[in-house]
Amino acid sequence: MNWDDPTDNGAGERLVGSVADGEDQAVEAALRPKDLGEFIGQEKVREQLDLVLRAARARGATADHVLLSGAPGLGKTTLSMIIAAEMGAPIRITSGPAIQHAGDLASILSSLQEGEVLFLDEIHRMSRPAEEMLYMAMEDFRVDVIVGKGPGATAIPLELPPFTLVGATTRAGLLPPPLRDRFGFTAHMEFYGPAELERVVHRSAGLLDVEIDTDGAAEIAGRSRGTPRIANRLLRRVRDYAQVKADGLITQEIAAAALAVYEVDARGLDRLDRAVLEALLKLFGGGPVGLSTLAVAVGEERETVEEVAEPFLVREGLLARTPRGRVATPAAWAHLGLTPPRAQTAGNGQQDLFGA
């Protein structure tokens, strides 16, 4: 429904992972909304973007450059396609990692049509020479093509037709200020609430010809980690279960049973998330414990624990990062049905000096 496609972090496929694999990309293409009216969620972003696009159409001009930031799976790619559709313009899609040389970018820019939308995913991963070329292209619609080498090299200015750059990033802080400042409109995509995700599930179920009741949609939405891409993936797996184990109708009971098979619990935690929490609680008494030690305890790479499991656990208030190491919160003990050590204080995992 609302998604984008960052580069895989090497953690492997997860049902609650926010990276889109080949199957996800194919399904997403069929489920994507075609205009802002169909797009669910991100109310402020939709309202602001609608004003930007309407004003540009009224002036008969190309829209300002747009920067979209936020976690994977929230709708950055979808919004870029909607921008092109609303402006009645074609769209060219590429990504930062694919542009390693200034010549790669010059080739793309020189072939753009007037008013065309260029979607640059993971823009923060573009090479520095290409990035510097992009400054001039965005501001002056011009690039300097270097011909020759050494002292005899000359710069030939190449005029570009007006175009709209839509940049997407999961790490806005890595963008240099000169690049950020050249975007006329910036927006941060927020995680979705349960009610919005229920609407996403109902809409996708209709497009996939899946029968689902209100409680079934709520059950899936509650385990989707605030991300439409995950909601759609869970919906497809629950659909499979309902077709094989039931009469095809997805109810709350069917959804809960199906997601139990796939090891996604009521809060959206999967096997990796629970393994991290269980190691932290059962082996290290709730912490603090170093990241490398925690990774060894769960049999995963350090980067996998830090980049794949921790962000959601921190956002859910189940784990805290402290200068001394990772610490479990009281919510983590409660979620796993365990009793914290008596010496642990509520909230920060520090020892109670008075033994209370």
Image (tube, rainbow, N blue to C red):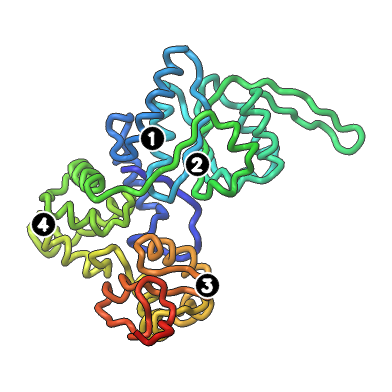
Mark 4 or mark 3, earlier in chain: 4
In the rendered structure, are the residues bearing label 1 and label 2 in contact, judged by CB atoms less than 8 Å apart? no
- Nearer mark to the viewer, of 4 and 3: 3
Amino acid type of the residue tagged 4 in the rendering: Thr
Mark 3 or mark 2, earlier in chain: 2
Mark 4 or mark 2, earlier in chain: 2
Identify the residue under disc 2.
168
Q: Secondary structure at mark 4?
A: loop
Q: Which mark is residue 45?
A: 1
Amino acid type of the residue tagged 2 in the rendering: Ala
Amino acid type of the residue tagged 1 in the rendering: Val
Instruction: Decide which of 228, 318 is in the foreground and name it.
Output: 318
Q: Position of residue 133 (x, y in %)?
A: 69, 34
Identify the residue under disc 4.
251
What is the distance, in whole Å, between disc 4 and disc 3 at their CAs?
Answer: 39 Å
Left or right: 321, with 339 as reference point: right
Label 4 packing within 10 angstroms: few (<14), some (14-19), many (20+): many
What is the distance, in whole Å, between disc 4 and disc 2 at their CAs?
Answer: 36 Å
What is the distance, in whole Å, between disc 3 and disc 2 at their CAs?
Answer: 27 Å
Q: Residue at x 45, y 47 (%)?
A: 70
Mark 3 or mark 1, earlier in chain: 1
Q: Residue at x 40, y 29 (%)?
A: 49
What is the distance, in whole Å, between disc 1 and disc 4 at their CAs?
Answer: 33 Å
Left or right: 17, with 10 as reference point: left
Q: Is residue 73 above or below residue 342?
A: above
Identify the residue under disc 3.
302
In the rendered structure, are the residues bearing label 4 and label 3 in contact, judged by CB atoms less than 8 Å apart? no
Q: Is residue 199 above or below residue 154?
A: below
